[in-house]
Amino acid sequence: MNLPTTADIVVIGGGVMGASTAYHLAQRGQKNVVLLEKEEFFSLGASGRNAGGVRYQFGTEVNVLLSLESLPMLHRFPEEIDQEIDFRPYGYFMFVTNENDKAVFEHNIATQHRLGVMTEWLDGDEVRRRLPMMNLDDAIGASFNPNDGVVDPNSVVMGYINRATQMGVTCLTEVEVTGIQVEGSKISAVETNQGSINTPIVVNAAGPWAKLIGDMAGLEIPIEPIRRQMMTTTPLPELPEDFPFVIDFEQSLYWHREGDGLLVGMSNKAEKPGFDQNIDSDFELLTLEKAAERMPLLEKVGMASHWAGLYEVTPDAHPIYGSTPIEGFYLVGGFSGHGFMHGPISGLLMTEIILDGAAKTVDVSMLDFARFAENRLIHEYNVI
């Protein structure tokens, strides 16, 4: 491997955000772009350790608009990027068990309808009719969108990496960023374990590690890593072929079909920030118990695999797009659990911000870095 000594743009992070950004920069004619990933392979970080869900169902207008652009890009991916991504439009059921959540969901559905996303509201009886293999006596309703689904994350990342490489981007693994050089208030170089790259522009797409990259540049970034873990089961012959992505909203517990079995996960609301990606066995057992209470079929299956990954969480559960107080230092991160599904559009938006001065396809100006200091937070309710 020969590390370039200069670059017009250095992108840090080989997950979906970095890969999409590199691809879209190349598509706009930027050739002297270098993408750096510290792991041995691309997509080993947060992008490769998520559940693969993609949805239109969000509580804020900007997140719905991001989905309206990003999910069609995933549908077109095989034709545009020449990479199959196993898009499975099973739909998302998000069921609620208390009146407060019901009121918020109904408000969110009204927002989605206004933007052209025709999510349905189903009453409790209809939910139980559609999911007869689950214990849902306490469900008072659910939102359902048949256009939501599941995609293979690694295929998306590698599709972008391969196309970006074909278009002239230098995409490197096992290159760890160790420092960011700032002269005055401008980016001047990226230091790595393989040497330095002189560059005027850095895109921090490091996901859960974005804060560490910011620290190297002397910039405090409000993104914290939070562990989330999930597992897959051995085959469940009784599982319907079209079993959807089901979410018990109050418990942050979810299931979706994975091969002949299920993928199961639950958010640990007591998890402390940190970079630990080991399995918490006690919480895993609790997850299985809660999942089996809802779905007794799980009592007779085994575990096929399990893993933990990291969410990249901001104080308002919305991402950060764009420039920072350091000239040439850009940030795309903090998606708080829904970054993979917005990765395609985010790379395009970052390209517009860098080359055109502002995002044009979707207005994300309210999701700037300055909103935290200026107390302009926009809270997302539909975060699992």
Image: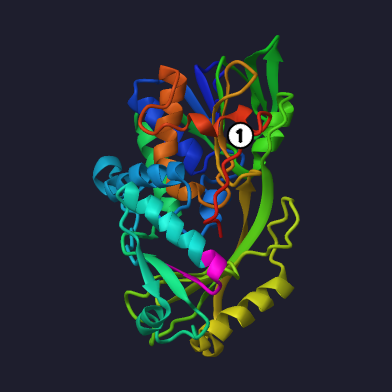
* Nearer the observer, 280 or 126: 126
Residue 342 sits in which quadrant?
top left
Residue drawn at (50%, 26%), measured in percent from left and top? 34
Residue drawn at (58%, 67%), measured in percent from left and top? 252
User: Is residue 32 among the parts visible in the rendering?
Assistant: no
Residue 306 sits in which quadrant?
bottom right
Q: Position of residue 221 (x, y in %)?
A: 68, 33
Which amino acid type is shown beneath numbered disc 1?
Arg
The segment highlighted magenta reads 93-101
Residue at the top extreme? Answer: 184
User: Is residue 349 among the parts visible in the rendering?
Assistant: yes
Q: Position of residue 54 (x, y in %)?
A: 41, 55
* Nearer the observer, 137 or 103: 103
Q: Which residue is mark 1?
A: 376
Q: Position of residue 9 (x, y in %)?
A: 51, 21
Residue drawn at (55%, 16%), measured in percent from left and top? 6
**253 falls in the magenta region:** no
Residue drawn at (72%, 68%), measured in percent from left and top? 280
For numbered disc 1, what is the local secondary structure? loop
Residue 142 sits in which quadrant?
bottom left
Q: Quadrant of the C terminus?
A: bottom right
